[in-house]
Structures are given as C-alpha cells and as structure tokens.
Image: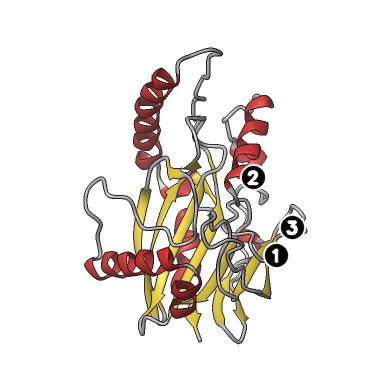
Amino acid sequence: MTRAGLARTLRNLRRGGLLLVLLHALTWPAAAGAAPAAAQAFDTPTLAFSYRPDLLGVPIAANVPACPPDDPGGRPDGVAPGHAAIVFAGARPLPPDAMLSCNLPDFDIAQLRVFSVAAYGKIYPDAARALADLGRVLEAGARQPDAKFPFVPFLEAFPAFSEHVAFVGFLNGRGVAFLTQWMIEPDTIGAHLVFVFQGLTADGTHYVLGLFPVQARLVLPPFPLPAGEPYERTYERYHAYAAEMARGVGAAQPGDFAPELEELLDLLRSLRIK
C-alpha cells in the first residue's frame, strides 16, 4: 500500500467515527465452541505450508511480475522483483488489485510472498541493506531494546509499536513475527493491526514476507484530533498514547486477537520454501 493509499484509508476511518470496540460475537465467523477445521496442505512450485480454511480463508497462488522503479531518483513505491505470492480469500471478496505488480505492501489482505534475495537487492538497493540487517537480527535471535525491526519493502510510515515478538523457525529457514500498526501521522491505533512476518531461508537465497491483518478483542481508546491543535502538541500527545497502546496490546494474550496469533505462528512454522 502506498503512502497515499494508507493516508486515504486512515482518513476514511476517522471520518466514519470508527469505534474500536471489537467484540468476539461480531468479528469471529465461527460460533463459540465450534471445533476448528482440520489443517490442509497447500503446495506450489515455490512454497508449501499447512493451513486451516476457517483461519484465513482459501489460499490463491500467483506469480507477480516485477515492479521496477519509474524514476531512479523518485520514490520506490511498490518496487520489487517478480515473485510468488499467496493471498487468502476469506469472507470478504479480494480487491481487484490484490495480485497486481507494484501493490506492495498491502496490510489489508492476508498474504505470503517469496522473493529472491539477490533480485530484490538488485532492483532496490535499500532492500539489500534491510535484508542484511534482518539476517543479523535472525542470527542473534533478539533485537536491541527500543530498536526497530528492519522492513524490506519500501514504506514511508512508522510502526506504532512492535509487540508479541516471536522468532519462528520454519522447515528450511527462520524468521521473526511481530504485531504492529503502520502509521503515517498521529492517529488512532487499533483499526489496522497487522501481524508481520519476515524470514530468510537457511541458505540465504530467499526472503519470505507474511502480512496478516488481525482484529483485537480489546477496547482500544481512540486518539482525539482537536481542530487547530499545533502539530508539535499533537505529536507530544501521540507519543504518550502510543506508549499506552503498546502496553495494553503487549499485555494481551495471543488469543485476544483474531486470527489468534499462535494459530498464525503454526502456519508459519509449516512453511517450506523450494
């Protein structure tokens, strides 16, 4: 999702007066106490994994063409090499641009993508540095306190927080997952939570990106935006608000989100990149 697209989404949510009270009865498709669906295998020439249809929906595979830079000196929105993509078709219809080139990242669609590390670094040099940083984080198995995780695709936004961090081994590699919401300006946190996964194969040749929108069972207070408030004051209030949201979201249990975070980790652990 480009900066403009993310800004448009956030403005629409704000105008609509969205209440961030996400109740289990309204957001969970399965009835309380219903047995989870059995895991199924999904296999493509590029990757394979096990999934539950009631968790994210049905996976759909496609090969996405490369998105080269329009202008060497311009913003690299969506720039990425050709790659294999899996999107999950759930209760809501997929948007028509779900598999289009240059539509990366999109935090509104559950998806997995597999890229060549060499090809990504060649088409977008900043990706080579981010991938090297990611490799160091995965090798250490931890991040430095208050440090941000590297994010490989270009994104002119910042994470509100990084909570529920999990280092995840998959069948032929390792990655790290965390819960966040990407922000382009001070705004309400909770409307666009996403569980982000980034991994590398054991041989270092492939980069895996997983994006999974989640909803919270928590009551998350909105961030008021008084008309005419000085920009500096808004940011001052936002920092305190974001810290409060990080504490609340971080203290929640993995099962306080839909899909449940542990179930997403089970899917990630089953990954095998070919």
Q: Would you identify the image quadrant in which residue 55 lies?
A: bottom right
Residue 245, x across and y down, in percent: 40, 33
Label 3 or label 2, whichever lies nearer to me, is 2
Q: Quadrant of residue 44?
A: bottom right
Crowd class of label 2 (few under 14; some 14 to 19; many from 20; radius 10 Å): few
Q: Horizontally, is 228 left or right of 4 in the view?
A: left
**What's the distance in space between the residues labelled 3 and 2, CA to CA?**
16 Å
Give the Cα distance between marks 1 and 2: 15 Å
Question: Is label 1 in a helix, a strand or a loop?
Answer: loop
Residue 270 visible (yes or no): no
Residue 5, label in figure: 2
Closer to the eye: label 3 or 1: 1
Where residue 14 sits in the image (x, y, percent)? 62, 27
Q: Disc 3 residue type?
A: Leu
Q: Nearer the viewer, residue 143 or 258?
A: 143
Q: Which residue is mark 1?
A: 100
Label 3: which residue?
94
Q: Disc 3 to disc 1, how far (Cα)?
A: 12 Å
